[in-house]
Image (cartoon, rainbow, N blue to C red):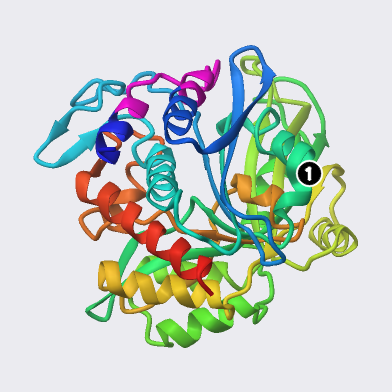
Amino acid sequence: MDIVELFKQMVRLDTTNPPGNEYLMTDLISAVLAKEGIWHEVQTTAEGRTNLIARIGVESELPPIILISHTDVVGCENQAWKHPPFEAVEEDQIIYGRGTVDTKHLTAMQIGALLALKDQPLNRAVYLLATSDEEQGSSLGMPRLVQQYGDLFKRGLVINEGGGFCITHQGNPYWLCTVGEKGRIEVKVTIEGASGPASFKSENKAIDTFIGLLDHLGSYQFPAVDTAVHHLFSEVVGTDITHPFLKHFSWYNSHDAIILQRYDIGTQVNVLPYRIEFEFSLQLLPGRSEQEARALLAALFAGTTVSYEVLRFDAGFESDCTNHFYKSMETLAQKHYGAHRLIPVYALGRTDGRFLGPLPSDVYGFSPVTDAIPFETILKLVHQVDERIDRDSIVKGTRFLTDLIQTMGNC
């Protein structure tokens, strides 16, 4: 099968979420797998919302390899694309379309690897999970597969989205690999103060408290922690870091962080807002407990008069960077892409990997693309106009994953 043509078929399916309609993707994948005699099942979680699980290899005592991706995409509203976002137009070896790097390219490469290895005598199970609803919180997607099949995924070695991008450091090409995700504690803050005309002097303006609190949160200095990921990152990259993104990752791998998510100060005209609400989250290094997170919040709000409520806590997780799987990934990245090393980092956002990490499983974000689309460019493509990928990335990524699975399936 021509995997690039299959990829183009996937991009042409409009699975914008909402509403999703991921059944379009699972119908296509199911037809391909059925033709090749590969075991699979489709799980329906709502009208038009489906997940797919497939398997090659054999059940054994060895940790399974789990290939995950999501089939929904974000919308294209108010974006002026060079080519229509659901036509998969190819121009100069570049394929344009929504989902080309988030994450239908990964789905296609993973399917290509399954097809290439379906008749090989692998010594462990290899699962493919194609999920719905990732772009809107995943409630109809990965958690439902974990609920039904989770016992099969324990101790898994997971290939996920989030990394696989080239970044040049000191003249050498490196490839980023995410090796865990930070936890989060989500918080709602309420500020109440005096009301009245905006021009009226007040000693208790809610807006003044709000601005002061934002400044406090934005300048809060979290202590550095030498996590295992930060330690290996420093070993690989060294201390002489000039690249701005690597400087950020060096800090990100070793610090908790604050993200402002939503705020509401009212809609009245020329009147002081007397009540302001906003929500933020603490991004927490893996290993932080909810008790530790609440202690951090207490320290943040010490000396203030505002009230806050914890909405949700999710623990982070960290994957093993010393095992045979990770080392094989690095060796094969050198073989297929000319990578100097893999650079381990925590994922910048939340992915479906967060439902597998705690099982436990080791989750690695590595959806590899060539150096034709470096990390700096990827940041401008994901969820944005003219999302695109080079043809060679699909071909090489399929070969990489095939090689990785075969390596692990014979050891």
Q: Residue furthest left?
A: 92
| Residue 11 counted in the magenta span | yes
Residue 85 location, quadrant: top left
Q: Local crowd at mark 1 within 10 Å, few (<14), some, or many (≥20)?
A: some
Q: Which residue is mark 1?
A: 187
Q: Is residue 17 visible?
A: yes
Q: Is residue 203 visible?
A: no
At which x and y percent is residue 101?
A: 36, 42
338 vs 307: above or below: below
Q: Residue at x 32, y 26 (%)?
A: 9
253 vs 116: above or below: below
Q: Residue at x 79, y 28 (%)?
A: 275
Quadrant for the C terminus, please.
bottom right
At which x and y percent is residue 221?
A: 66, 69
Q: How many marks?
A: 1
At which x and y percent is residue 160?
A: 52, 52
Q: Residue at x 25, y 21 (%)?
A: 87
Please tell me whether mark 1 sits on a helix, a strand or a loop.
strand
Residue range corresponding to the magenta coloring: 9-27
Q: Amino acid at mark 1?
A: Val
Q: Nearer the viewer, residue 152 or 234?
A: 152
126 vs 32: above or below: below
Residue 370 location, quadrant: bottom left
Q: Residue furthest right?
A: 291
| Residue 391 counted in the magenta span | no
Residue 183 location, quadrant: bottom right
Residue 317 located left or right of residue 172: right
Quadrant for the N terminus, please.
top left
Q: Nearer the viewer, residue 58 or 100?
A: 58
At which x and y percent is residue 43?
A: 66, 26
